[in-house]
Amino acid sequence: MGENETAWRILPVGDFHIGVETDEEGLHPRYDEYVRDEKDAVERKLTLWRLLTDSINALDLDYVVFLGDNFGKFSEANCEVLKDLFKDLRCPVIGVMGNHDAGQRLADGTWPPDYWLERRKRISEDVFGHDVCAGFDLRGGWRLILLNNATPIARDRYMFTIADEDLSFLESELARGLPCVTVMHVPFRFPKAYATMCHRRIYEKPADQRRLDSIPRQFMYPPMQEKLNALRKKHANWRGNIAGHVHYYACDEEDGFTQWTFPIWPERSDPLRCLDVHDF
């Protein structure tokens, strides 16, 4: 059997951000400058994707994998736009949830009750055609495990966790003993180069403007990080993780475990940058 028949390959697609986030009164104040150019940027992104469709089909992929924050603003119309992009692809398209995929935020920056349950089910089943958490076979006997880890720990706290039932799903997949890679929107381990960059930016600001809590507050809830690290140490078959969220391209390797993070597609990296068995 040739290597191309046993070596899997996927195309990770970082935060796609279709649509522009606004509040009920108009533009969200934090996005005033961002929004001015964003509509044009989205159109350029959609045009580029369509132009690259034949190139994507030539990559011999197992899957195209969307890494969450698929929407800048969730809407039924944007769901249809995303699904339309998939229709000419020859390989399956799968994806995870991101924090922007919850729906419209309130003025205080939080989400209304039940948005997560409703939106993640809608996107996973209707747009991607699979459950919120799902496992997929890869060539060579590997597994690709998709998890929802972009659930805020509380209405007013912008830090993320994994629901108990989703963690149980991960444990059951790892217990099968097959070599596997997970996909989560939020990196459960902080990218080292990104952390260095963020700290530098913080300390370049005047002392009264520094937000020393601005880095960890958008990442995994520490108790959940500890649970995931314990699982990683217990199951050597868990080879790595792929994430988005940080809008930063990086690869970290530690103790035989590799984490890749991808930027907003198609910025700051090759838009057709694939990952395969040799990357883990």
Image: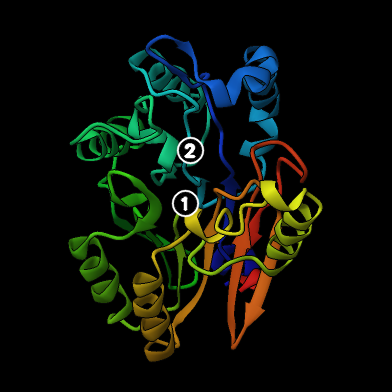
The label shown at residue 185 is: 1
Q: Amino acid at mark 2?
A: Asp
Residue at 53% of width from left, 32% of height from top?
89
Give the residue at mark 2: 69
Query: Are the residues at dot 2 and dot 1 in contact (C-beta closer than 8 Å)?
Result: yes
Tell me where residue 220 sits by quadrant: bottom left
Q: Secondary structure at mark 2?
A: loop
**In the rendered image, which quarter is residue 103 located in?**
top left
Position in image of residue 159 (x %, y %): 40, 55
Please rate how many residues cluster around mark 1, counting C-alpha atoms within 10 Å: few if below 14, some from 14 to 19, many from 20. Answer: many
Q: Where in the figure is residue 125, as x and y percent of width and height? A: 26, 36
Residue flagged by tag 1: what amino acid is it?
His
Front residue of this view, candidates 192 and 58: 192
Q: Nearer the viewer, residue 58 or 211?
A: 211
Residue at the image point whose x is 77% and y is 52% from the top: 201
Residue 3 rendering spot, x and y as whole percentages:
64, 69
